[in-house]
Amino acid sequence: MNPVTIVTGASSGIGEALARVFAGRGHALALVARREQRLKALAAEIVASGAPEPLVLAIDLTLPTAAAWIGNALAARGLEPQYVVNNAGFGLVGRADALDRDEQLATIDLNMRALADLSLAFVDSLARHRGGILNVASVAGLIPGPGSAVYYASKAFVVSFSDALHAELAPRGIRVTCLCPGPVATGFQARAGVAEAEPPRPFALPADRVARAGYRGLMRGRRMVVPGIANKIVAALAPRIVPRETLLAMLEARQARRLT
């Protein structure tokens, strides 16, 4: 079986940037997302750059059978995962009691259940190829999130889960890194239903810089990567220095402004 890197949410944003970074470093890719045409366009771009043609797998990762379907699709082509990049995810902005409940549960299905499934489904092949897992969380996973409660909680799960896997899978030679970016200008904002066009400075970073930082961290076996000095300060100091009640009030006010 030949090794391949699975990149979920590869049709846009950080996932698209991660696919380019991995392809540029010589990794064979399996691109996963719902939007097949976007994946095919990215695959054509990667081929034009001189890299091997990626496999395009269009599937809704919220389906309970998604991980098994991906595994079967790879095996049928003589492929098995060396790296799994769990980037797919979305969030909603607004009060949890006012947002659509089914959409919030879909956030949990994608950000948490699908990520956990894909992290565990291919452990044996990751060990065989001395590979790893890159889970894309967020600085949001390190602080409370009124005004986007389910999204922040889902990213807190990713941080905790990745930390644990980092320790548990290390004896098998599997690297597990949690990438925690701050705001990035992607399609995330529109999907979340917010009004702002550009993420706030100095926290905002371009997707390609975030992707390069995540790749370097994974290859070096780092437990967590927080790109950008401002985001590192928030991640390290805000939960420890700012009183919890104050932090909650500040974040709730910011989320309210994003909806205006």
Image: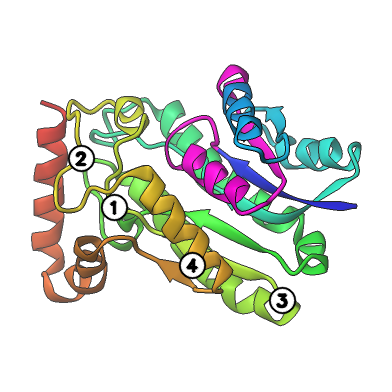
Give me the C-alpha separation between circle 2 and circle 3: 37 Å
| Residue at which label 1 appears | 182
Name the residue nearer the viewer: 229 or 100.
229
Q: Are discs 4 and 1 less than 8 Å apart at CB?
A: no
Q: Is residue 206 magenta?
A: no
164 lies above or below 192: below
Q: Secondary structure at mark 2?
A: loop
Point out the frontmost of discs 2 and 4.
4
Badge 4 amino acid: Gly
Q: Of callouts 1 and 3, which one flags the residue occurring earlier in the amino acid sequence?
A: 3
Residue 134 pos. (x, y %): 56, 58
Badge 2 amino acid: Pro
Name the residue nearer the viewer: 53 or 255.
53
| Residue at which label 4 appears | 217
Badge 1 amino acid: Gly
| Residue at which label 3 appears | 173
| Residue at which label 2 appears | 199
Q: Is residue 157 visible?
A: no
Q: Is residue 63 left or right of residue 159?
A: right
Q: Are discs 2 and 1 less than 8 Å apart at CB?
A: yes
Point out the frontmost of discs 4 and 1.
4
Q: Residue furthest bottom?
A: 171
Q: Is residue 143 left or right of residue 159?
A: left
Residue 145 pos. (x, y %): 25, 50
Give me the C-alpha separation between circle 4 and circle 1: 16 Å
The residue shown at (24%, 61%) is 231
Q: Of callouts 4 and 1, which one flags the residue occurring earlier in the amino acid sequence?
A: 1
- Specify the quadrant of the image occupied by residue 233: bottom left
Q: Secondary structure at mark 1?
A: loop
